[in-house]
Image (cartoon, rainbow, N blue to C red):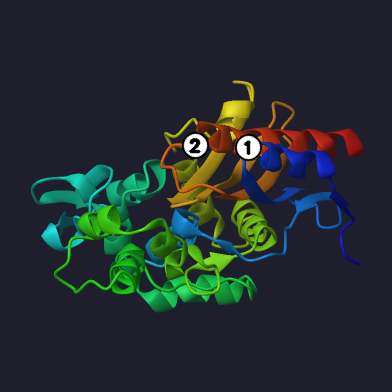
Amino acid sequence: MSAPTVETTDIADIFTRVGAVGYLHAREIGVADGPEVEVRADEPVVLASVFKILVLVAYVRAVEAGELDPTERTTVTARYRTGGVGTAGFADDVEASWRDLALNMMSMSDNAATDLIYHRVGADAVQQVIIDLGLDGTHLVGCCEDLFDSVVSDLGGTPDSDLEELLAGATPEQIWTLSALDPDRTSGSTPREVTTLLNALWTDAAAPAPASAAARDIMARQIWPHRLSSAFPAEVKLAAKTGTLPAWRNEAGVVTYPDGRQYAVAVFTRADSLTERLPAVDASIGQAAFAAIEHLRSLTV
């Protein structure tokens, strides 16, 4: 029997009012046939950095299996410095342990840390997570550098081209047609499959219990307060991952209430504008998630 679902027009309107299309799925952790809230929950979305949850699962599986020593140190070299936060934006090579790179990958969305871990555990290990959890609507084009390479190629660049310069010189029409913004041509999934992934991680079905606990702890250390967490009171705990590309602003995670009940929620938005800063769209992610989870809580005792 499929779980009952609730399509909430009021939640969809939260996105419409700020000039975006929203995609959302929310469910209670560990409740197989409980109510769900959905807004376009089965439509394809661009994962952006939300795909790093899959890399994290592959990483903790490798550590648990003894295939990777988390204290072993490696060097982030110029190859991986694509710009952005963390080691990806460093001017010089830096040495770090795998566990610290995993923390950077999830807490601040460090792209260099992500790609190093992705290459260390291997694409097949990340794909195996997708297969094991039956995420048939989820597909990856690779890691961050593969996504950036697709942008360079779409804009007519070469491997030696500077990505920022290409983007600065691109027209809005060129940006809108990038394969990186099309869920069918880049790393994509659906909100429902992302909450399936989160539920598996929070119920120890995605990895052995110690590995799942380690992943949950890392996800709880994310530093960004402007999306999901912006709408929840301080006593509510969140463990989540953001994702951002032009027009796309996302966040998916697990919300834990003081009574111990936990909810997986995945929110993806596609703005009507390519403007870099759209704080109202960012805030709508938290507002919609809060409304969805409060609705779930109102349906069950």
Give residue 275's position: percent from left, percent from top: 44, 43
For disc 1, the neighbor class at 10 Å (few under 14, some 14 to 19, many from 20) is some
Secondary element at image label 2: loop
Q: In screen coordinates, is 113 left or right of 254?
A: left
Is there a contact, CB below 8 Å, between mark 1 and mark 2?
A: yes
Residue that label 2 marks: 278
Q: CA distance from mark 1 to mark 2?
A: 9 Å
Task: Write the residue at 34% across / 72% down.
Answer: 154
Residue 159 pos. (x, y %): 18, 73
Question: At label 1, which amino acid type do we have?
Answer: Val
- Give residue 191's mark: none
Disc 2 residue type (three-letter): Leu
Task: In this rendered view, identify the residue nearer to me: 195 or 172.
Answer: 172
Among numbered discs 1 and 2, the one appearing first in the sequence: 1
| Count of marks overlaid on the render | 2
Quarter-of-image position of residue 166: bottom left
Q: Is residue 263 above or below residue 50?
A: above
Query: Is 127 placed above or below 37 here?
Result: below
Residue sitting at the far left: 92
Tell me the residue at 31%/54% (across/down). Answer: 111
Residue found at x 44% / y 38%: 222
In the visual, does 158 lie left or right of 263? left
Residue 99 drawn at (x, y percent)? 31, 50
Q: Quadrant of the N terminus?
A: bottom right
Q: Quadrant of residue 113?
A: bottom left
Name the residue carrying label 1. Answer: 18
